[in-house]
Image: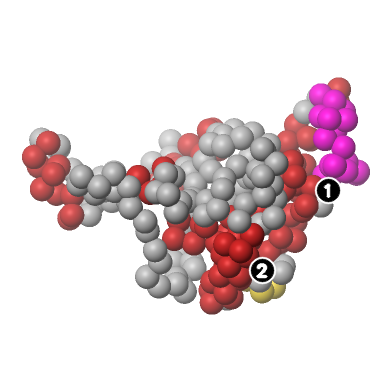
Amino acid sequence: MSGDSPSYEPYLRELGAADASDAIFAGGGWCPIADLEHADMAYEWMFGSSALSSGEVVDQTVSKRLSAAFAGHQASLRPRGKRGFGPLTARTYDDYLLRTYLQPAATRHLTALPDAERGAYLDKNAWITWSGGSAAFAWEDFLAHVGRKKNVPAFDSFGLCAPENNLFGRGTTKARHFTPYSLRHTENLGDDVNVLMCWDAGHGANQDPGDFMRWTGEVTGYRR
């Protein structure tokens, strides 16, 4: 899908593609990297000193530089949280994510389980507190549960060995570095974006295909 970009027209004609619009009406991104330009910074803000599964701690000099850059980037955007949370900064972002996405996601997941399965899950994950039908836990415990999966930098690898480096390859050059040209200041362009988190299901989980299809119908006007 090119989104009707004229850049692709010569190639589509050469391929014999139908002369029709390929505008994107709706998209469902399961674990998307929405801002690859600043993803290395965000990853270090989140995982920082967390060790890899091997027990190795990544280069802390590089990690701290990227984490500090994320704080500056976020401050430049001047974002505000939903439901009256207030300004989002590198110091408040973890609490916002916990309250707005992570704990509600865990609550929905646990509520949907039969009592016996819920009890077994909580016994296995003692870092989660279940009280009054709601899940609660600390940010640090959530990070330990997820675990650090990538070295530093996480996406624009120094050795050009990350899949994202390959994404920016061109011609006979298989992989290239990508660097930010400017910081993005516009946050919300009026698009209809529905954001929920699928709890503890790994990378790329799609646990609500029915809801996604209904939402697609609403935003495209093709709901039946």
Which mark is drawn over residue 136? Answer: 1
Which mark is drawn over residue 90? Answer: 2
Residue at 45% across, 72% down: 183
In the rendered image, residue 17, in percent from the top left (x then y), is placed at 14, 37
Q: Quadrant of the C terminus?
A: top left
Amino acid type of the residue that numbered disc 2 sits on in the rendered structure: Ala
Which stretch did the figure color magenta?
A: 117-135
Check residue 16 for magenta coloring.
no
Residue at 57% across, 74% down: 72
Check residue 133 for magenta coloring.
yes
Amino acid type of the residue that numbered disc 1 sits on in the rendered structure: Ala
Q: How is the image coloured?
A: secondary structure
Q: CA distance from mark 2 to mark 1?
A: 21 Å
Q: Earlier in the sequence, mark 2 or mark 1?
A: 2
The one nearer the camera, 144 or 210, is: 144
Residue at 62% across, 52% down: 58
Secondary element type, mark 2: loop
Residue at 77% across, 28% down: 113
Quarter of the rendering containing residue 7: bottom left
Q: Is residue 153 visible?
A: yes
In the rendered image, residue 208, in percent from the top left (x then y), is placed at 58, 35
In-image side of 147 versus 13 (left or right): right
